[in-house]
């Protein structure tokens, strides 16, 4: 069974600080998604990365897919309280429709 | 685009009753939908894959007779929790698979349904 390990599990930072969340696996994924979830709501898709080494930017969020397509990172610049939430990475096995979810990173940005 | 709705958003029921949760893709057709369960402060756990016009595929450890799934159309999948018990209380989330570039699997999630069984 493929596993996706996310780190850190919890992160509490001050507004304005930068942070990076990591998503690692020993297996290759055909694509990887990052989601953000707020309490009592469903996950909201932030980005999908497909190509090894791919970098995508979404305002202050930068997503990178590892060259070997086994890992990914999410970097947030100048975090704001509105960034608070649960960040989930999810990977798709080659040839499979299923997503394997990481354990999640709970981010708290203090004003 | 790519909006998924769930109904109801929350439900409270007595132990022994059955509860039906609907998942709809509002602006796209979804041949494949997924049902997840999420416990407090944990990640999503896939329960089953719902395929339009065919039987659902259940993950290991998920009782198919307990969690009945019907995917009767390209925009609707339902999950029925039969004879619910307090341990079935959880946050149930559905997603719908949106086809894009080959090999790029993107799922769009519903807002979730919180079930409380008394």
Image (cartoon, rainbow, N blue to C red):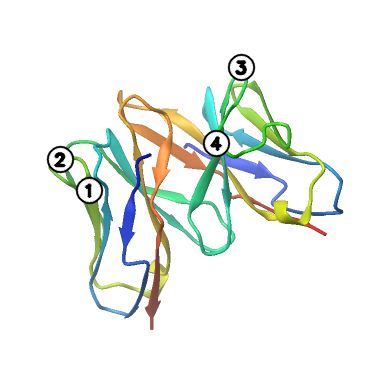
Is there one chain holding both mark 3 and mark 4? Answer: yes
Dot 4 corresponds to which residue?
B60
Q: What is the distance, in whole Å, between disc 2 and disc 4 at their CAs? A: 29 Å
Q: In the rendered view, tell whether residue A4 sits above or below residue B77.
A: below
Asked whether the residues under the numbered discs 2 and 1 touch, taking CB atoms below 8 Å apart as contact, a structural biologist would say yes
x, y (%) of residue B91?
63, 53
Q: Secondary structure at mark 3?
A: loop
Protein chain holding label 4: B
How many numbered marks appear? 4
x, y (%) of residue B83?
82, 42
Is there one chain holding both mark 1 and mark 4? Answer: no
* In-front residue for pair B95/B75: B95
Residue B39 in view: yes
Is there one chain holding both mark 2 and mark 1? Answer: yes
* In-front residue for pair B101/B66: B66
Q: What is the number of the mark on residue B107?
A: none
Protein chain holding label 1: A
Is there one chain holding both mark 2 and mark 4? Answer: no
Q: Residues within 10 Å of mark 3 (few under 14, many from 20)?
A: few
Q: Residues within 10 Å of mark 2 (few under 14, many from 20)?
A: few
């Amino acid at each position: 069974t493929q596993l996706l390990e996310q780190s850190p599990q919890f992160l509490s930072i001050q507004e304005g600080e930068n942070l990076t969340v990591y998503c690692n696996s020993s297996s290759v994924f055909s694509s990887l998604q990052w989601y953000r979830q707020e309490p009592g709501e469903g996950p909201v898709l932030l980005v999908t990365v497909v190509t090894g080494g791919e970098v995508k930017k979404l305002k202050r969020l930068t997503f990178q897919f590892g060259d070997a397509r086994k890992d990914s990172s999410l970097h947030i610049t100048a975090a704001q309280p509105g960034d608070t939430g649960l960040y989930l990475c999810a990977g798709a096995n080659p040839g499979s429709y299923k997503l394997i979810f990481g354990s999640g990173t709970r981010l708290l940005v203090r004003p | 685009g790519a909006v998924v709705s769930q109904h109801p958003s929350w439900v409270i029921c007595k132990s022994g009753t059955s509860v039906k949760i609907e998942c709809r893709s509002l602006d796209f057709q979804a041949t494949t939908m997924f049902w997840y369960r999420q416990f407090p402060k944990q990640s999503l756990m896939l329960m089953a894959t719902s395929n339009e016009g065919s039987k659902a595929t259940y993950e290991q450890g998920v009782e198919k007779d307990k969690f009945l799934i019907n995917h009767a159309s390209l925009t609707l999948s339902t999950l029925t929790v039969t004879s619910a018990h307090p341990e079935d209380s959880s946050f149930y989330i559905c997603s719908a698979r949106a086809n894009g570039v080959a090999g790029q699997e993107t799922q769009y999630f519903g807002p979730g349904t919180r079930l409380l069984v008394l």
